[in-house]
Amino acid sequence: MSRAPLQATENLPNRPIPAEAAKPGEKPNPYGPNFPKGGPQNKWTLQDFDIGRPLGKGKFGNVYLAREKASKYIVALKVLFKSQLQKAQVEHQLRREIEIQSHLRHPNILRLFGYFYDETRIYLILEFAPRGEMYKSLQKQPKQRFDEPRSSKYIRQMADALRDIKPENLLLDMKGELKIADFGWSVHAPTSKRATMCGTLDYLPPEMIEGQTHDDKVDLWSLGVLTYEFLVGKPPFEAGDNNETYRRITKVDLKFPPHVSDGAKDIISQLLMKDPAKRITLDKCLEHPWILEHNAPAKK
Ligand code: AMP
């Protein structure tokens, strides 16, 4: 399968624009001369967008509601300051995340339609998520937790998205060694805010804490922590300080409040196995009774 290079970001889904006559010897462009946009000769610029209200503030810049002028398509425009990215030495990481995210096509993975930059900023053209952050939604619930059907639905979607990101999520490093990109969790896990801002480590698996080699099985652990947090309202190994959290994670000190069903306890316990090889796989997760019980049969 051919993959677009990083420079050739894609066109936004746009309304049909009437085909215009091509110059002699040129291939007619069915979208007209301004589309598809995002290639080396035809780059997006800030002038292509009307900017609306701020949607949120991130570590490296702000996110705004925006509308692409030609198509009237609504997007979220993430504005990152180059100076801040350089200072934190995350330019490589950003490049990698752009490369991965722009190739992913999954209903539960936020689309990155394209990017552009000017002297001081980098702009990411993102799918707009009208209902905003999962964490805020969790906090707004009567008991700051989701019920079992809702948690089960989200976990099925997470398991499905994680399963789907495989080939695009594998990168090659300078020496040609395979690299699993941990795309996804840092952005979407509900505690990402706390993790980055207060330095809590609730989603880290034991093998990472103990400094052992780790692979994509870390995602299974994180999925278990996420399931628990959805149902209980806080992560399973939360503690007063980092040392205690470490201790509880490495001992898998897992306790459930009485309202958690047996099915949910079973899937969580199978995801939170200390030995990564013993963790339930994503495929098996999607077939787990707690997932089947609360979700309509899969469309696939
Ligand atoms: P971030 O820099 O990704 O942490 O984004 C900062 C905040 O902007 C997030 O916490 C969200 O509240 C909001 N936000 C980011 N991306 C989107 C989006 N695609 N749709 C809606 N809101 C978003």
Image (cartoon, rainbow, N blue to C red):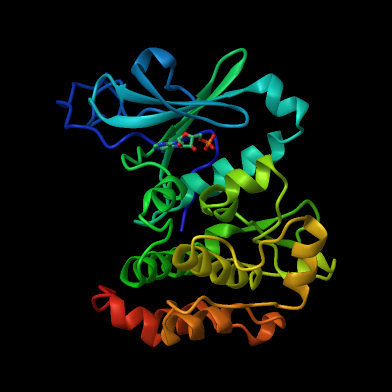
Q: Is residue 40 left or right of residue 147?
A: right
Q: Where is residue 273 in the image (x, y as percent from the top left)?
A: 65, 82
Residue appearing at x 62%, y 31% in the figure: 59
Q: Where is residue 54 in the image (x, y as percent from the top left)?
A: 41, 23
Please identify the quarter of the rendering in which residue 24 is found: top left
Q: Where is residue 154 in the image (x, y as percent from the top left)?
A: 39, 64
Quadrant in the picture for the C terminus:
bottom left
Q: Is residue 231 above or below residue 67?
A: below
Q: Where is residue 167 in the image (x, y as percent from the top left)?
A: 54, 63
* Of residues 85 and 118, the one drawn nearer to the viewer in this rendering: 85
Please identify the quarter of the rendering in which residue 77 is found: top left
* Of residues 142 and 190, the one drawn nearer to the viewer in this rendering: 142
Residue appearing at x 37%, y 27% in the figure: 37
Residue appearing at x 37%, y 87% in the figure: 289
Please identify the quarter of the rendering in which residue 145 is found: bottom left
Q: In this view, does 173 lie above or below 254?
A: above
